[in-house]
Image: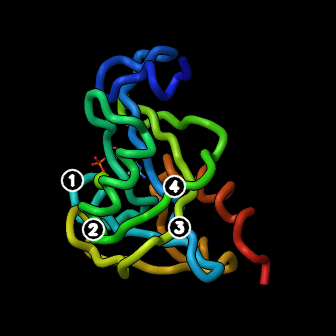
């Protein structure tokens, strides 16, 4: 069995004991989607890769698709896992996948108050959550340079 079939959501992660939060580097037309959080207060106004907590019994890629449906109103297709795992608040870790749009245009339906599609040279124009910065830097390598 692989890790993705043995790991069940918000139970302890097999390797680290941490709850997994999944997020998407949503790529379209040479741009990356940035989402500005509206809650909680200490994160509001900061920009992130959209996503959320994996639920019990849920596969991470399924959680990613569900979160993008709930938060943005789109159908998305997960791509590759961006290597690495980044600590969030105590007991939570962030894992990131690239993703592409299957249908719909993202709207800030839940937890965000603004969305922006950023080209590679625009990625530093928003105030990313510190936790997301390494994954954003990796995602930038998947965007065209010009
Ligand atoms: N978080 C950090 N970066 C992200 C995401 C999607 C989430 N790209 C953090 C914020 C919260 C926790 O993970 O502390 C759970 O996220 P959510 O379920 O509130 O989106
Ligand atoms: Mg979320």
**First reached walking from the N terminus: tag 3 or tag 2:** 3
Q: x, y (%) of residue 27?
A: 57, 70
Please rate how many residues cluster around mark 4, counting C-alpha atoms within 10 Å: few if below 14, some from 14 to 19, many from 20: many
Q: Residue at x 63, y 47 (%)?
A: 82
Secondary element at tag 2: strand
Q: Name the mark on residue 40.
A: 1
Q: x, y (%) of residue 29?
A: 61, 82
| Nearer to us: label 1 or label 4 | 4
Q: Which residue is mark 4?
A: 78
Alpha-carbon span between mark 1 and mark 4 = 26 Å
Q: Which residue is mark 2?
A: 112
Q: CB atoms at circles 3 and 4 under 8 Å apart?
A: no
In the shown orientation, is residue 13 left or right of residue 133? Answer: left
**First reached walking from the N terminus: tag 3 or tag 4:** 4
Q: Which residue is mark 3?
A: 100
Q: CB atoms at circles 1 and 2 under 8 Å apart?
A: no
**First reached walking from the N terminus: tag 1 or tag 4:** 1
**First reached walking from the N terminus: tag 2 or tag 4:** 4
Q: Residue at x 44, y 19 (%)?
A: 6
Alpha-carbon span between mark 3 and mark 4 = 7 Å
Alpha-carbon span between mark 2 and mark 4 = 21 Å
Mark 1 Cβ and ligand 1 under 8 Å apart: yes
Alpha-carbon span between mark 3 and mark 2 = 19 Å
Q: CB atoms at circles 1 and 4 under 8 Å apart?
A: no
Figure check: 23 above or below 19: below
Indicate the quadrant where residue 121 lies. Answer: bottom right
Q: x, y (%) of residue 138?
A: 68, 55
Secondary element at tag 4: strand
Please rate how many residues cluster around mark 3, counting C-alpha atoms within 10 Å: few if below 14, some from 14 to 19, many from 20: some
């Amino acid at each position: 069995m692989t890790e993705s079939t043995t790991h069940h959501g918000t139970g302890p992660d097999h390797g680290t004991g941490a709850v997994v939060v999944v997020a998407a580097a949503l790529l379209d037309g040479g741009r990356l989607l940035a989402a500005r959080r509206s809650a909680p207060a200490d994160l509001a106004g900061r920009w992130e890769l959209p996503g959320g907590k994996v639920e019990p019994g849920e596969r991470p890629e399924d959680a990613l698709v569900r979160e993008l449906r709930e938060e943005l109103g789109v159908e998305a297709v997960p791509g590759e896992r961006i290597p690495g795992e980044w600590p969030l608040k105590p007991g939570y870790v962030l894992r990131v996948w690239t993703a592409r749009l299957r249908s719909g245009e993202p709207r800030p339906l839940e937890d965000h108050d603004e969305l922006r599609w950023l080209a590679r040279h625009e990625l530093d124009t928003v105030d990313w959550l510190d936790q997301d910065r390494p994954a954003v830097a990796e995602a930038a390598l998947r965007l065209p340079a010009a």
